[in-house]
Image: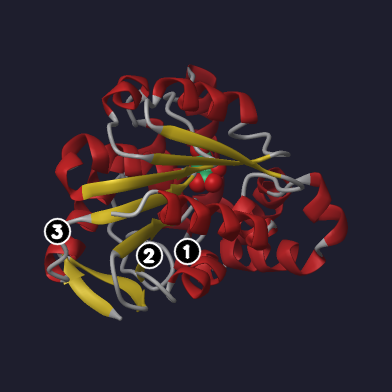
Amino acid sequence: MQAKINGIELAFDLQGSGVPVLLLHAFPLNRSMWQAQANALSRQFRVITPDFRGFGDSERSDEPYTMELLADDICALLKHLSVDQIILGGLSMGGYVAFAFYLKYPEMVQRLILADTRAEADTEDGKANRRAVAELARKRGAAVIAELMTPKLLGATTRQEKPEVVKRVKEMIAACAPTAIANAQIGMSLRPDSTSTLKAITCPTLILVGEEDLLTTVEMAKNMHSKIKDSVLQVVPKAGHLSNLEQPESFNAHLVDFLQDQPV
Ligand code: MLT
């Protein structure tokens, strides 16, 4: 489905009915990464999976995709769908956007799911690296970024044992518009530190992290868990940074358990 949101055509899928669960995808992927979760949750929930501007089937705009801009797109999409409150989940960049959304619209969030993400802003080296990747994407295209990023996004187990997942991730990245990669990299480099937001989170929160995640590590997840009062932490075995794609069964089992233990 598509709707004109904040001046751009935003693509999204709706699956199932019940309490709305909105899932925000990672960088530089698209809403299709949530397929297995949407299938599992749509038996009980209304699952909403948008493509961020520039990604998947959503229209591009040429400006830095700040986390606040992306959160505002999501809020406008929810208004369009007449949805007032959600269970909000995000993986990695999706998690950064979830922090921005929670900061601005806390009353709309009933439960939070933070997967393979972190609250800290980038270091100066991290920012410089993002600017370099943005430049590389603009000059050499998305296929180069796919080769560069895929090994970092996936855990060692997936790289060794699940070639179909490796192929799927590479294809998703290679299909991205280079300008969207660049704009999101710059947007992420501008994101503020969300550490102070952690203490302000009052809703029940599930924190998930792949055991083999080297980008947003188990240590970082433990740190978020220690600061979010009403949170549970689950480590997904044999998964890297894209834990939902790498080990969908364990990931989904944790989602379902959390949502059953913490009904809205
Ligand atoms: C993601 O998976 O969304 C990215 O790894 C986030 C990032 O680059 O910080």
Q: Earlier in the sequence, mark 1 or mark 3?
A: 1
Say if 220 sits above or below 33 in the image: above
Q: Residues within 10 Å of mark 1 (few under 14, many from 20)?
A: many
Q: Nearer the viewer, residue 132 or 8?
A: 8
Q: Earlier in the sequence, mark 2 or mark 1?
A: 1
Q: Which residue is mark 3?
A: 84
Check the picture and name the quadrant holding the N terminus: bottom left
Q: Residue at x 52, y 66 (%)?
A: 37
Q: Residue at x 47, y 70 (%)?
A: 38
Q: Residue at x 19, y 40 (%)?
A: 106
Q: Position of residue 170 (x, y in %)?
A: 67, 62
Give the CA separation, mark 3 to mark 2: 20 Å
Quadrant in the rendering for residue 24: bottom left
Q: Earlier in the sequence, mark 3 or mark 2?
A: 2
**In the rendering, which numbered label is found on residue 51?**
2
Amino acid carrying label 1: it is Asn
Say if 140 sits above or below 189 in the image: below
SS at badge 3: loop
Q: Which residue is mark 1?
A: 30
Amino acid carrying label 3: it is Asp
The single residue placed furthest to the right in the displayed view is 160
SS at badge 2: loop
Q: Position of residue 6 (x, y in %)?
A: 15, 61
| Residue 226 falls left or right of residue 103 | right
Check the picture and name the quadrant holding the C terminus: bottom left
User: Contact (CB < 8 A) between labels 2 and 1?
Assistant: yes
Amino acid carrying label 2: it is Asp
Q: Position of residue 246 (x, y in %)?
A: 69, 57
| Residue 112 falls left or right of residue 158 | left
> Is residue 135 something that shows in the picture?
no
